[in-house]
């Protein structure tokens, strides 16, 4: 069952989904969400706090631990993100909260971090996978901000115990809201409808967001190829087989992540709450569009197909899990490349099945430089999946998690990511924070 009764209603709904998902972010979205919560807390308090209590879910800790905070001068981790957001963040800019940070803010942040004791970080238990609580204290006053469910969702904002905004009552309520949002997306999106929208629908209402995604994500990819960021995965790939379009597609996507994970202060357009996924869904499509001579409106339609498939696959998993989201975005990119290559709807679906059947088991062990390599592996699988599908080859039902239909296969892989990998997620975090002796 779907939420639309006509093509026009479908087109508006899909454009609304794209406009909601395709927003700008400066840096990795988890440390940025922490900085956003901190900036909101300071704004609510009305002054710089004397000290801060930061409670985060395991997935937030995992994804902030090793990534460079943008505009920080090379600082990494939770303490840096929350302190810089407190000192210099502009809450009105949401996921671009650190764009206006200056040298004075960076110096003040370093002073507070070196002094020690300014931030107290705790692991929050029995909360949604995406959960951030900042309590900022000054004199006799305390501001409290909770971000939960998704990166800009203000679930609660209060001052001295008085609720000012948000309706956070319990982790269970947030989980229920997240399930409702998931159910709505799953009900609205299916591959046949996405392809029909890409081929014949009106994309005008999402045109600006799609064009911005191409422009910004192309720019950070070029930055990653031109300069030495991170582990230089993109530069390594391009230096090895620059004449191979599939290698160039991998390099373009990886290079954007190289720069982004290492603190590059250039914005990206995200998908599914992730800049890496926004990059992965975009750059292979752009590279193959150049190879195939696709441009203008058809390129935007291919990008819309990629984004919507990415959102569709990821919606079964949720915002954060042990399942690497780059795989979901690579499914979208592979589907779009297949479509631009003249693939039938059946071949587009086979591309997604082939990709999930290949690299569906890549785990997320936090945001860091190796994300670029995982993106490369996922895109490589997607292009192989496209090549197999165009040759009439695919994995079959009963082989592992592959089911009778594309939609059932997506759902089965999503179940593994959402439910089956929960214990994996816990053990990854335990290893990362030193609670498990692996020897």
Image (cartoon, rainbow, N blue to C red):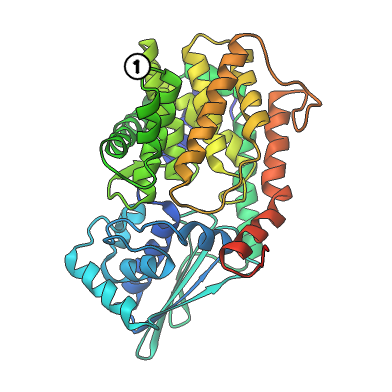
Q: How many numbered dots are placed on residues in this image?
A: 1
Residue at left offset 67%, top offset 45%: 417
> Vertically, is 305 above or below 125?
above
Q: Residue furthest left?
A: 103
> Vertically, is 247 above or below 64?
above
> Vertically, is 365 above or below 82?
above
Badge 1 marks a residue whose secondary structure is helix
Q: Nearer the viewer, residue 1 or 22?
A: 22
Residue at left offset 67%, top offset 40%: 414
Q: Residues within 10 Å of mark 1 (few under 14, many from 20)?
A: few
Q: Is residue 357 visible to us here?
A: yes
Q: Quadrant of residue 428?
A: bottom right
- What x and y, as percent, mark residue 45? 34, 78
Residue at left offset 61%, top offset 63%: 431
Where does label 1 land, which residue?
A: 290
- What x and y, as percent, mark residue 70? 31, 56
Q: Nearer the viewer, residue 165 or 208?
A: 208
Q: Nearer the viewer, residue 396 or 181?
A: 396
Residue 402 in the figure: left or right of residue 293: right
- What x and y, as percent, mark residue 389? 62, 14
Q: Is residue 269 visible to us here?
A: no
Q: Residue furthest bottom?
A: 140
In the rendered image, the quadrant that contains the C terminus is bottom right
> Vertically, is 181 above or below 431?
above
Q: Residue furthest right?
A: 398
In the rendered image, the quadrant that contains the N terminus is top right
- What x and y, as percent, mark residue 327? 56, 36
């Amino acid at each position: 069952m779907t939420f639309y009764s006509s093509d026009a209603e479908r087109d508006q709904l899909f454009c609304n989904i794209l406009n909601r998902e395709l927003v700008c972010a400066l840096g990795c979205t988890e440390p940025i969400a922490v900085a956003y919560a901190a900036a909101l807390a300071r704004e609510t308090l009305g002054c710089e706090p004397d000290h801060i209590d930061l409670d985060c879910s395991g997935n937030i800790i995992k994804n902030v631990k090793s990534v460079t905070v943008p505009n920080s001068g090379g600082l990494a981790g939770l303490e840096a993100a929350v302190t810089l957001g407190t000192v210099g963040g502009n809450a009105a800019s949401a996921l671009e909260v650190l764009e206006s940070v200056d040298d004075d803010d960076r110096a003040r942040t370093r002073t507070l971090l070196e002094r020690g004791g300014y931030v107290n970080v705790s692991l929050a238990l029995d909360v949604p996978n995406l959960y951030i609580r900042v309590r900022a204290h000054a004199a006799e006053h305390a501001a409290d901000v909770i971000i939960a469910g998704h990166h800009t969702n203000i679930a609660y904002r209060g001052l001295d115990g008085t609720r000012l905004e948000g309706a956070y009552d319990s982790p269970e309520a947030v989980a229920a809201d997240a399930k409702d949002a998931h159910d709505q997306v799953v009900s609205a999106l299916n591959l046949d409808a996405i392809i029909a929208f890409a081929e014949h629908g009106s994309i005008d209402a999402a045109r600006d967001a799609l064009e911005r995604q191409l422009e910004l994500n192309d720019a950070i990819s070029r930055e990653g190829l031109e300069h030495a960021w991170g582990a230089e995965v993109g530069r390594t790939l391009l230096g090895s087989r620059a004449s191979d379009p599939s290698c160039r597609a991998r390099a373009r996507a990886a290079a954007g992540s190289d720069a982004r994970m290492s603190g590059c202060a250039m914005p990206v357009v995200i998908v599914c709450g992730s800049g890496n996924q926004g990059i992965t869904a975009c750059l292979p499509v752009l590279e193959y569009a150049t190879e195939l001579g696709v441009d203008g409106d058809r390129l935007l339609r291919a990008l819309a197909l990629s984004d919507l498939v990415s959102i569709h696959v990821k919606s079964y998993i949720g915002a954060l899990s042990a399942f690497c989201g780059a795989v979901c975005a690579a499914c979208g990119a592979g589907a779009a490349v297949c479509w631009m290559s003249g693939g039938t709807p059946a071949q587009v679906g086979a591309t997604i099945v082939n990709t999930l059947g290949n690299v569906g088991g890549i785990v997320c062990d936090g945001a860091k430089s190796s994300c670029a390599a995982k993106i490369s592996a996922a895109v490589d699988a997607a292009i192989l999946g496209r090549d197999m599908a165009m040759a009439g080859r695919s994995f079959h039902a009963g082989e592992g998690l592959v089911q009778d239909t594309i939609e059932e296969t997506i759902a089965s892989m999503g179940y593994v990511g959402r439910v089956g990998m929960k214990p994996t997620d816990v053990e990854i975090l335990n290893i990362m924070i030193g609670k498990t002796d692996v020897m």
